[in-house]
Image (cartoon, rainbow, N blue to C red):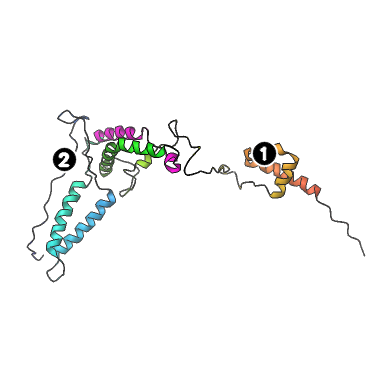
Amino acid sequence: MEQTGLAPPKVRAPIPTVQQGDASSKNGRPYRETQTQLFRPQQVRAFRQDLNRLQALMDAPSYVGGDRAQAHKDYMRMDAQVEAQTPHAYGADEVDIALKRELVLREQFTAGMPTAAEMRRTPAGAIDKHTSWEQRNKPAILEWKNIRRRLHASGALDGFPEYSTDVANVEVYRPTGGSGELNMDNTLIPSQLHFLPPAGAGQAVVMSEDQEAFLQTMDPKLFGRMALLTNEQRKLVLSTVDEMLSEQLPKDPPKVKK
């Protein structure tokens, strides 16, 4: 390889991880993860690709164009950032400590968390509820995200692929409903409820205009209960209606033989 006069990239020691032992560090304080944002798996991959590109430029022969001095500066700056913000795997005796802390933080920020319906439909009070919740739990969420990313790097989270986008996604744990949900009667975003037949019930039975008019005239109470019947019950009622309608149709006059 041709000499470029540039110093090779420095090799840095791994970032210190959790103190070994019980859920307390050696100084007697409970374990807390850093709140400085660690990179997502996709970000780490993108930065590694950029580092490889810069390294290839620095290693290229002299006849290959390019600003090697600037490439060296960019490499050193980016390498330091990647090393500082890449989630490092926990040690074997540190995973349990991190898992306990992750659970504590998750239970903390999901308490009072706006529900999925509140975020989607925005009833009265939802914006203030979300703002208050976010301000109250921001430090816990930042720490939780970093623990999740380090646990993922340790292989301690099942069900998440290598470049998963949901490893540190709080939406995965957003509650649905519950006694603390706001009143949904006056929402900014209206909703529509669609009641479909259960799986395996076959094609939904729908009344025609003739069936609807006939049933509404003959039995208004039954007509009002049609939406509450099962698919099979509606099918039975409408088949009876069809028979009654067919009896009311005028019969064709007999053909006269010539």
Query: Reading the chain from its start, which is encountered first: label 1 or label 2?
Result: 2
Determine which residue is flagged by label 1.
Answer: 224
- Residue 124 % position (x, y): 44, 38
- Residue 131 % position (x, y): 35, 39
Whether residue 228 sits left or right of residue 15 in the image: it is right
| Residue 228 occupies quadrant | top right
Total labels drawn: 2
Mark 2 is on which residue type?
Answer: Pro
Q: If the image is split into quadrants, where does the N terminus sit?
A: bottom left
Q: Characterize the local packing of mark 2: few (<14), some (14-19) or many (20 or more) Cα atoms within 10 angstroms.
A: few
As drawn, the residue found furthest toward the bottom would be 63
In this rendering, is residue 50 above or below 168? below
Mark 1 is on which residue type?
Answer: Gly
Q: Secondary structure at mark 1?
A: helix
Determine which residue is flagged by label 2.
Answer: 16
- Range of residues picked out in magenta: 96-123
As drawn, the residue found furthest toward the top would be 28
| Residue 217 occupies quadrant | top right
Whether residue 189 sits left or right of residue 57 in the image: it is right
